[in-house]
Image: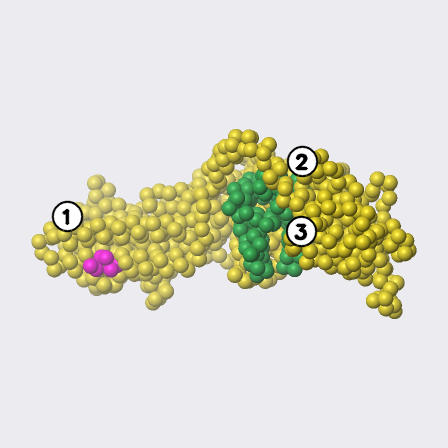
Amino acid sequence: MKKRVLTVDDSRTIRNMLLVTLNNAGFETIQAEDGVEGLEKLEDANPDVIVTDINMPRLDGFGFIEGVRRNDRYRAVPILVLTTESDAEKKNRARQAGATGWIVKPFDPTKLIDAIERVTA
Amino acid sequence: MDMNEIKEIFFQECEEQLAELESGLLKLNDGDRDPETVNAVFRAVHSIKGGAGAFGLDDLVSFAHVFETTLDCVRSNRLEPNQEVLKVMLRSADVLADLTNAARDGGSVDEARSRQLIKELEALANGEVPQAAAEPAPKAAPPAAAAPVPPVNEEGFQPVAFSFEEFETGEEPAIDLPTYEILFRPKSDLYAKGNDATLLLRDLSRLGEMSIHCDMDGLPALDRMNPEAAYFAWKISLKTDKVEEAIRSVFEFAEWDCELEVMLADDQAQAHEELPMQPVPFDLSMLDEEPRASVEEEDRTVAGERDIRELAGSAAEATSNVVQMTPSAARVPAESGRSAASAAAQSAASQQAASAATPTIRVDLDRVDRLINLVGELVINQAMLSQSVIENDTNGTSSINMGLEELQQLTREIQDSVMAIRAQPVKPVFQRMSRIVREIADMTGKSVRLVTEGENTEVDKTVIDKLAEPLTHMIRNAVDHGLETPEKRIAAGKNPEGTVRLTAKHRSGRIVIELADDGAGINREKVRQKAIDNDLIAADANLSDEEIDNLIFHAGFSTADKISDISGRGVGMDVVKRSIQALGGRINISSKPGQGSVFTMSLPLTLAVLDGMVVTVANQTLVVPLTAIVETLQPEASAIHSFGANQRLISIRNSFCPLVDVGRILNFRATQANPVDGVALLVESEGGGQRALMVDAIQGQRQVVIKSLEANYTHVPGIAAATILGDGRVALILDVDAIVAASRGQALKPEMSLAAAG
């Protein structure tokens, strides 16, 4: 069965790059544009792993991660955070919020898939 | 979808983000301190940087990074976004736009300018506020895969990073691979954050030959066991050619949530004594198999005898149990609170949905254009059908006629809806103007404030696209020629900061765009003198103020004493006027000395259809745009007055109005027609003057689809475009302003002379 990835990013560019990369790697991709939509789509998406951006309107990545971790069914789903720079502070905040790991943008397909494989069985 | 398409999307997105950025900065400039505004500005730059990084657009990335860093200072209240700061930021936004364009279309940017701004931005981030010095310098950011800082364990022991690469030269790696002893003790947080010890061990096993021992000392009795706690620790010995850094990077995601020790085993024999196990390669297949031993059965005293695979398997199984049990364990206590929580969540969600923008789709413009073309054909076809039915059906009450009427109505509605698809707010063009204003203000040393109103007024996309150029030129003029220098303004008792007001609004089926400045107004003496010097008017010409003002639209007219770098680019207001006219629009100026000038442009909402009056002139069918017509009347012989050699006037309600013989002007006939035999259309031309156009007869009022003459034939003076009528014949659409202008010279010339008007 295909692994399901929920991607949450407000940038159309990044969403599309994730989509192409993940689909090529044989994942099923469900997209959301911000944290609020990400939480709304959580049930339907039933993801094996979540990839989320930090800076987003309405609900940012930190809030989204906390929201997922509060969800009884999905709180153990691995969450990878997209960070633009290896900004230690942002990474730490993401981890405090409950992120599993991170991917540094710009990501190449290998880097992205590696990180996902790393947190999924 | 391939990378090129994504790149295209990226540039589209950049444009939106740049617009967002600029409008946000302008809001801040107006004193808006809403954190969401700052966030939106930050996000815009951040997004551009993120996408640019993905496409390796390094110039864009590095500039965006510096910009972002400074914006972050504003976001975290370390930098007050005062006017000075915003000035730098607005200019940075301009450079960011330039860099984006350069990345898309090639070409170069003003590097000195961007370097200068980088310096200024960095100064803002570092210099002004002392704490900001902690900001990482953009280039000093550690590379992505930097080693995590080794954790300090309870004893305060911090493993020292050590590289063996230099030792390996010349040695046979297969024989003497170093062995690492790794202690890995996850905390419960590790599982809570979605990490899985099993997976980490799997990754570790990929580095080399691994043997593993699970320390289950911490496991309590089943009744005291917390399913979400972490009880196991692993001692791993790993034979690998990789350096310690590689081992640590496996635990990168988990470094906070576990104890990790990585040591080089200096004495392997000792390690064997301490660990009751045989070094057996870690078998990944165990992860997928059913459990063969339960945790209770495990007895570590016999561990030495046991197949180490089984141990590893059960340990892994126990670990994944922890993860699997998590949901069910937490479900019970959470169940009671769930309904309330979900209700709250639902209401919050619906609130947010309401505040969100209505969903939109992006459509290729070509598709819309094709649709518009088809609808145009449909309109023509429907008209043809109506006409032939009317011709063949004399009683006129049949159900066919009823159906046709409905069809006509539907066609009209379809047309309106399709036109609405193309309608776009003028906002993007207006936003571009704020940059123009900034640049010219900088160049001229004037202080200017641009106020825009009615940004959301919608108009056809083609009109918007073609509006930018004339508008840019007019703004340049307004700042360069219209506004005074701050010193002069102060002397005149005005605010040293000049205001340029750009307004858009809908008025009777057209869009009206006003550009007003509060400058000195038109210097009529100077304009008049200039016109006399250039032989545009006679020295003794008696011109009204309005006529003098309109002289600036005359070809080759420039009031600036010297041709300045800004507005004097060989393009005068005449070009502006011509481009507005090409859009089927009109432009007017009104000016008050000392108070400023107002340019008013009135443009059709769409360039695709037109409401027209179909008339006959010398057996030709012509269409007169309905918007130009004020009224129609049947002239009486007593109302016609001759004037001069061949001019005639018609008196309407006690005022006289020049009579324009359309057939004569278009050279349809050589002699003047008798006005009493025809119909006069009272039209309002630019400048506010009224003229009576004389035609032979009115056929009716109809919506016509505009077909460009330039695209299919060539420009014909006096004719704006063509259309296809219901009977399939081509009819020409009159360019009323051109006809009126020509009537002054009594002949249609490509360059119409205003001089004759005097």
**In terms of secondary structure, what is the magenta stretch mainly?**
helix
Residue at left 88%, top 63%?
B167
Give the mark, 2 or 3, whose residue is nearer the N terminus.
2
**Disc 2, SS:** loop
Chain hosting mark 2: B
Give the mark, 1 or 2, whose residue is nearer the N terminus.
2
* Part of the protein shown in magenta: B380-385
User: What's the amino acid at mark 3?
Assistant: Pro
Q: Is residue B586 left or right of residue B216?
A: left
Looking at the picture, how far across and down is residue B125, in whole percent? 71, 42
**Disc 1, SS:** loop
Q: Residues within 10 Å of mark 2 (few under 14, many from 20)?
A: few
Q: Is residue B113 left or right of residue B503?
A: right
Q: Is residue B136 magenta?
A: no
Query: In the rendered picture, chain A carries what hue?
Result: green
**Residue B31 versus residue B640 in the image, above or below:** above
Cβ–Cβ under 8 Å for marks 1 and 2: no
Which mark is in front, 2 or 3?
Answer: 3
Give the mark, 3 or 1, whose residue is nearer the N terminus.
3
Circle number at residue B291: 3
Residue at left 21%, top 45%?
B651
Quarter holding residue B99? bottom right
Which residue matches tag 2? B77
Cβ–Cβ under 8 Å for marks 2 and 3: no
Which residue matches tag 1? B636
What is the CA distance from the residue labelled 2 to the residue labelled 3?
A: 56 Å
